[in-house]
Image: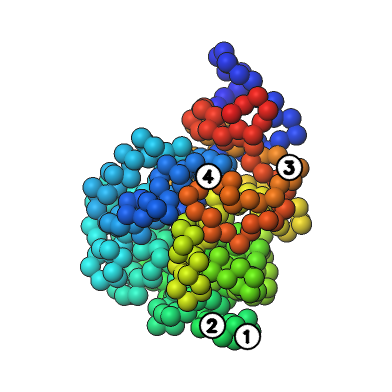
Amino acid sequence: IGIDLNISADQVIEAKDLIVTPGLVDMHVHLREPGFEYKETIATGTRSAVAGGFTTVACMANTKPTIDSPDLVNFIHLQAKEYGSANVLPIGAITKDLDGELITDWRSLIEAGVVALSDDGKTVMDASIMWNVLVLSAEMGFPVIDHCEEHNLTTGTVMNLGKISLELGLPGQSNASEEIIIARDLLLAEQTGGHVHIAHVSTEGGVDLIHWAKQRKICVTAESCPHHFTITDAEVIDHGAKAKVHPPLRTQKDVDAIIHGLAEGIIDTIATDHAPHASFEKDRGMQEAPAGIIGLETSVPLVITKLVNTGKLELNDAIAKMTHIPSEILGIDRGTLSVEAVADVTLIDPKKLQIVDSAQFESKSRNTPFDGWELEGWPVMTIRGGEIMMSKIKGNR
């Protein structure tokens, strides 16, 4: 990328009336490889990413085997180089097999190229382990991505605890289950100097705690997901297990608080927590189905339709939360259109109306509660490293 570049071009793209942004960055996805390739692979997951306008994704460690050794990190790098349509950044596990007990070799994982450490999908319940990984975070400068659920309050639960769960007769988890761990780890970050990144914030109390921590200059960043700022636990009534996710969909009061947190900069980034599951798994019903929603291909239009077009979030702020801010948190040279930057670019048509049709997704999985929604503002071209990876613009692939 540059000004007055003295180069020739085989193709000129007309971007009039389109939004041109840096290639989008999602710092929280599950690509399921190795071990769960029937749900998603690096190939299908990154095709889903570029279909949604993302040129870079960071993949969580809850694979089988877990990304808990340099060999597994190298495997992800090699698979992404061979089959990836988007840049793939591995995140390493804090504990072996995410068991919460035996720690991995954190320093070796960082040296092998992980951009963060996380046991996402599970909470590190041992506070001494969190203390020690945050001490190393302060030394080496990486974020610790924190899945916040107090397991003693969440085991066996399938949705938010509240009016809807009581009506449906389903076991629910309280907001406190998330907020207890957020509070604990904010205090640990303050006293160690480490960088804690709170994943998928879903509660009003969580937003308040993060705001408190930022006022105290604690090294904390946070993300929220489109499903947590667009829909509530009432979706379970109509969509059942397709609306089952951890942390669960909450109440409208919580949704409003998440939106406020995004607008005020309390919540730094928007991430999808793209969590593919096979249809036969989601068909098992609320008690037996795994938790998770896919999000790479619906994130942009949900943000534009539900936040930008409603005046709840400025377009520039929304773009920042999906480009340069997650890049800065992860310490990568992406998310910018500055001179000499890598040519990762996303083009969005802000007026394009389209109905969500999961049957057309590039992802292997179809577990979304947004099927049939009419949304406005869709990615129409994704360019990675100067190469067009996806195009809905006439005359391009």
Q: Can you give x and y, in whole percent of width and height, for residue 69 in the image?
A: 24, 53
Q: Can residue 232 be seen? A: no
**Which quarter of the rendering shows the N terminus?**
top right
Image disc number at residue 362: 4
Residue at image coords 49%, 41%: 47
Q: Which residue is mark 2?
A: 170
Q: Earlier in the sequence, mark 2 or mark 3?
A: 2
Q: Earlier in the sequence, mark 1 or mark 4?
A: 1
* Element class at badge 2: loop
Q: Earlier in the sequence, mark 4 or mark 2?
A: 2
Q: CA distance from mark 2 to mark 3?
A: 39 Å
**Which quarter of the rendering shows the C terminus?**
top right
Image disc number at residue 167: 1
Query: For the residue carrying disc 1, how many other residues have a C-alpha within 10 Å: few (<14), some (14-19), or many (20+)?
Result: few
Give 273 or 128, whichever is nearer the viewer: 273
Q: Earlier in the sequence, mark 3 or mark 4?
A: 3
Query: For the residue carrying disc 3, how many other residues have a C-alpha within 10 Å: few (<14), some (14-19), or many (20+)?
Result: some
Amino acid type, mark 4: Glu
For marks 3 and 4, give the one nearer the viewer.
4
Query: For the residue carrying disc 2, how many other residues have a C-alpha within 10 Å: few (<14), some (14-19), or many (20+)?
Result: some
Amino acid type, mark 2: Leu
Q: Along the horizontal axis of the image, is 14 left or right of 185?
A: right
Q: CA distance from mark 3 to mark 4?
A: 19 Å
Image position of 203 with respect to 87: above or below: below
